[in-house]
């Protein structure tokens, strides 16, 4: 009898001592397959009976959860020694009105999250997406995070691009990081790519946590989507350095990249989204002193494994405009570059650039602190900074992209600016190819002028590019519109670019920003 009572007491203690974790946490958004959908993901530490997003339109400041969407949960057991277990939920919310703001919460009958909001992507290309981008921000020393949280709450951005290195190969660290970014990622789409600290256990932490358009289960780790007048391609640079998980991963990715780029450069697609932007973690070029791949003569990302599957030739062939990278814990802007040669544009380096422009933005803050720079950088390096910070990008229209680098060390000061620009005739030329005949004055200069003169290639950081020219040959003229219309192409180009405003980031006319850039480059 005594033994029975002891057994019963131990059972009661065990039952009443059990802890359950039904509450949603680590909530984050990503774009769905089209502007009418949004992906919502979160974690619970215990299994729950359902995965639900309740949502609606806020009217007069009141949230109405009069619609709902159901999804699924999957058990994720980390490959580490602790075998940390959690349940990751993904719901695709469909039937949204493009550009409409919604309020939502997520969870189940056992517990709901706090209320958050999101805005469905706007339809088409006639709008100017505002994006904040960075890499190498982790749980420890995430210096830029408070400022980013504030700016997202103020409505400054439409999306976030986190360009790798966030989970640090550990489920517990990943959990805490995802909790830290929830105030950001639960309110704006958080678009990602894997970094070198996501590779362990065949990228299992990354694959299980992040659902992206066209890659809901995370298995591919490459995807693309359109946002305004831009086609964005996210891919894994890490496949080249994690060959222990199979040689076919970089092969499949390369084949997919070429298929995607062929579609992106078709005349019909290029007329809608003329900009092509890529994001991946490890850069092809850098001026750092840490002996990373990008410091090598033949970077693997750039030239491939044994000179197979190299990406620089592929991206140049299909006219990629802008490549966004991280990995180096610094900020660096490059001149237009291909095969280590600078190909500056016509009236200035970033007007009709003759090769892709590279931006390395890996200085948001992490446990590994800063990287250093060489004292004698190559001629393709335009600007470098070791300040903690992040990059803002405003895709203004079909011909202009504006970017600026924010220094968190300097309390939010803008330390670098760049305006990429294509004249309207150049955009049409890129769409129609040989079928379009333009005069030299249409494009702004002859093809020979795309190749830089020796005095246009400057290696000293303080002696930057030639002065930005005014937009006298800009694609916004009525004549340029007439030429576009004659080929049946509609471009998102303002008739008077000088009166356009750079969203909520600057609230300044473009001509003022270009004047400030010119002053910056003169030092």
Image (cartoon, helix red, strand yellow):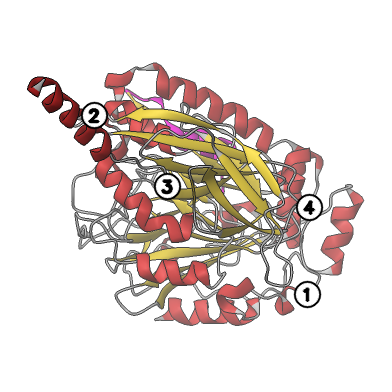
Q: Nearer the viewer, mark 2 or mark 4?
A: 2
- Name which quarter of the figure residue 164 lies in: top left
> Residue at 36% across / 17% down in the picture?
247
Relative horizontal placement of residue 266, taking residue 285 as reference (left or right): right
Nearest to N terminus: mark 3 or mark 2: 3
Q: CA distance from mark 1 to mark 4?
A: 22 Å
Question: Is any atom of residue 235 visible in this view?
Answer: no
Label 3's element?
loop
> Residue at 72% across / 59% down in the picture?
57
Q: Does 307 lie within the magenta span?
A: yes
Nearest to N terminus: mark 2 or mark 1: 2
Residue 467 x/y as whole percent: 52, 76
> Residue at 41% across / 17% down in the picture?
248
Q: Nearer the viewer, mark 3 or mark 2?
A: 3
Dot label at residue 438:
4
Nearest to N terminus: mark 1 or mark 4: 4
Label pair 2/1, CB-CB below 8 angstroms: no
Q: Nearer the viewer, mark 1 or mark 4?
A: 1
Q: Residues within 10 Å of mark 4 (few under 14, many from 20)?
A: some
The residue indicated by pointer 2 is 83
Q: Which residues are magenta?
A: 306-321
Nearest to N terminus: mark 4 or mark 3: 3
Vertical relation: 67 (above or below) 468: above
The residue indicated by pointer 3 is 23
The residue indicated by pointer 1 is 496
Nearest to N terminus: mark 3 or mark 1: 3
Relative horizontal placement of residue 28, taking residue 164 as reference (left or right): right
Q: CA distance from mark 2 to mark 1?
A: 59 Å
Q: Does 469 lie within the magenta span?
A: no
Q: Nearer the viewer, mark 2 or mark 1?
A: 2
- Name which quarter of the figure residue 388 lies in: bottom left
């Amino acid at each position: 009898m005594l033994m029975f009572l002891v057994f019963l007491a131990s059972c009661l203690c065990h039952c009443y001592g059990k802890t359950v974790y039904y509450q949603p946490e680590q909530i984050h958004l990503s774009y769905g397959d089209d502007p009418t959908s949004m992906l919502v993901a979160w974690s619970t530490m215990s299994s729950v009976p359902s995965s639900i997003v309740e949502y609606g339109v806020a009217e007069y400041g009141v949230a109405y959860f009069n619609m709902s969407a159901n999804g699924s949960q999957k058990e994720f057991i980390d490959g580490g020694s602790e075998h940390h277990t959690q349940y990751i939920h993904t719901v695709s919310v469909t039937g949204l009105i493009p550009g409409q703001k919604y309020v939502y919460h997520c969870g189940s009958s056992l517990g709901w999250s706090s209320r958050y909001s999101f805005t469905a992507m706007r339809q088409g290309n006639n709008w100017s997406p505002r994006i904040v981008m960075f890499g190498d921000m982790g749980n420890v020393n995430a210096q830029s995070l408070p400022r980013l949280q504030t700016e997202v709450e103020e409505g400054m951005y439409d999306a976030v691009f986190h360009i790798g290195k966030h989970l640090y190969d550990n489920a517990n660290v990943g959990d805490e990081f995802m909790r830290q970014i929830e105030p950001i990622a639960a309110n704006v789409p958080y678009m990602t790519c894997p970094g070198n600290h996501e590779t362990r256990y065949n990228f299992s932490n990354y694959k299980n946590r992040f659902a992206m358009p066209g890659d809901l289960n995370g298995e591919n780790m490459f995807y693309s989507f359109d946002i305004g007048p831009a086609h964005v391609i996210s891919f894994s640079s890490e496949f080249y350095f994690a060959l222990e998980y199979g040689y076919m991963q970089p092969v499949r990715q390369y084949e997919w990249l070429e298929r995607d780029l062929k579609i992106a450069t078709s005349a019909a697609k290029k007329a809608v989204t003329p900009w092509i932007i890529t994001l991946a973690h490890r850069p092809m070029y850098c001026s750092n002193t840490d002996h990373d791949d990008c410091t090598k003569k033949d970077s693997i990302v750039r030239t491939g494994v044994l000179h197979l599957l190299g990406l620089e030739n592929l991206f140049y062939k299909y006219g990629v405009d802008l490549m966004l990278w991280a990995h180096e814990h610094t900020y660096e802007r490059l001149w237009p570059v291909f095969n280590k040669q600078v190909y500056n544009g016509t009236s200035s380096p970033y007007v009709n650039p003759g090769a892709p422009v590279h931006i390395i933005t890996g200085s948001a803050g992490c446990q590994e602190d800063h990287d250093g720079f060489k004292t004698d950088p190559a001629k393709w390096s335009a600007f470098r900074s070791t300040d903690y910070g992040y990059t803002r990008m405003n895709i203004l229209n079909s011909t202009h992209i504006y970017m600026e680098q924010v220094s968190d060390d300097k309390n939010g000061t803008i330390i670098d600016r760049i305006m990429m620009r294509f004249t309207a005739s150049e955009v049409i030329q890129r769409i129609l190819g040989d079928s379009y005949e333009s005069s030299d004055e249409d494009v702004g200069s002859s093809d020979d002028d795309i190749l830089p003169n020796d005095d246009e290639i400057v290696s000293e950081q303080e002696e930057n590019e030639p002065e930005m020219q005014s937009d006298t040959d800009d694609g916004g003229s009525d004549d340029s519109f007439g030429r576009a219309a004659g080929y049946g192409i509609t471009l998102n180009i303002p008739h008077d670019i000088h009166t356009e405003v750079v969203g909520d980031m600057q609230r300044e006319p473009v001509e003022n920003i270009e004047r400030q850039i010119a002053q910056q480059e003169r030092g």
